[in-house]
Amino acid sequence: MRVLITGSSGFVGQHLTTRLLARFPDAELLPSIGDITDRAQIEEAIKRFKPDHCLHLAAISTIGAARSDPKRAWQVNLEGTLILAEAMQHHAPEGMFLFASTAEVYGKSFQAGTPLDEKGLLAPANAYALTKSAADLALGMLAMQGLRAVRMRPFNHTGPGQSADFVVPAFARQIARIGAGQQEPCLRVGNLDAARDFLDVRDVCDAYLDVIASASQIEPGAIFNLCSGQSRSIRSILDQLLEISGIEAKIEIDPARLRPSDIPMALGNADAAKASLNWRPRIDWETTLQDVMTDWRQRIAENPEV
């Protein structure tokens, strides 16, 4: 079984690689294929390697990065995805193409306040979500033309190794710095009233591997939400991290961390993944937060400037 993971050096990619090799020890992990926006390079790589499974994670993956450079976000998230998908369709037509989309595609549909399943209306509320929505829809069209595409829509996920560009590690980093005497006991935060449906990154990776295991039974174009079905306020996550760490700190709102189109609550329904993949989250939330906190304590100890 030849498996290509794009974005394998990233946060999710590193966890996925580890779990893939543990679960499928005989799998051949194909080498990195470089810039997904380089059509000639991608065509040549797919033609040469003919992956049985392409797990496409590579992306401009933060809302802030997409907002600051929308042109690049379109190039990578839409054009790069299409280049890769079309190469798979032409040179490895029997191969499965798993696309790491995002629950951000639902955007303003979350305002209904009910758990959204895969029939939820796509209503992206930021540049990142818009580029991923376009790719998600385009892959649906290619699936009707024969591409064995599977679209995964994970909700917020975190875990050890994630950068401080995301909310949970951003808190953990500051708390670890305070604990190490590298920062005054004051946490600078964004909107604490927003609520999100969070997962552990390792549960998300296991869902991707469940798709590989069930590939022959999955219809081309299938969509799977990945979520816990529970919404947690950002404030409650901060409180838990402080409790885990034993740190007391003043909380200060930083206007630079506030998003102009923040959605009050996001909540999902993952019944389709449970029914088709026998998937459910297995890592409890406190373990996730403990692991994130441990990770940042180690990072700060090794490099106080990180």
Image: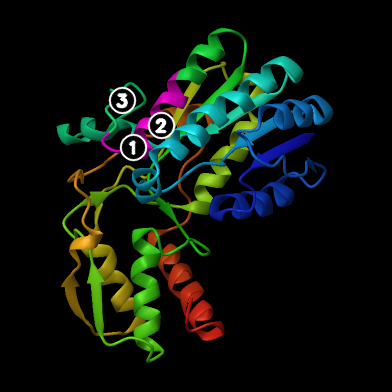
Q: Would residue 130 be counted in the magenta stretch?
A: yes
- Asked if residue 254 is positioned above or below residue 8 in the image, the reply reads below
Mark 2 or mark 3, which is nearer to you? 2
Question: Which amino acid type is shown beneath numbered disc 3?
Answer: Leu
Mark 3 surroundings within 10 Å by alpha-carbon count, few (fewer than 14), some (14 through 19), many (20 or more): many
Q: Which residue is mark 1?
A: 127
Q: Residue at x 79, y 41 (%)?
A: 27
Q: Nearer the viewer, residue 239 or 58?
A: 58
Q: Circle 3 sits on which residue?
A: 122
Considering only order in the chain, which callout, 1 or 3, is on the residue closer to the N terminus? 3
Q: Amino acid at mark 2?
A: Thr
Which circle marks residue 131 in the picture?
A: 2
Q: Secondary structure at mark 2?
A: helix
Give the answer, above or below, for where 74 lies relative to 192.
Answer: above
Front of the two marks 3 and 1: 1
Image location (x, y in percent) of residue 130: 35, 31
Task: Determine the image quadrant of residue 117.
Answer: top left
Say which amino acid is labelled 1: Ala
Residue 126 within the segment the image draws in magenta: yes
Identify the residue at image location x=20%, y=52%.
194
Distance Cα–Cα, label 1 vs label 2: 6 Å
Q: CA distance from mark 3 to mark 1?
A: 13 Å
Closer-to-camera residue (47/199):
47
Determine the CA span between mark 2 and mark 3: 12 Å
Give the main secondary structure, helix, strand or loop, of the magenta stretch.
helix
| Mark 1–mark 2 CB contact (< 8 Å) | yes
Helix, strand or loop status at disc 1:
helix
Horizontal and vertical percent for residue 208?
A: 57, 38
Residue numbers of the magenta segment: 125-137
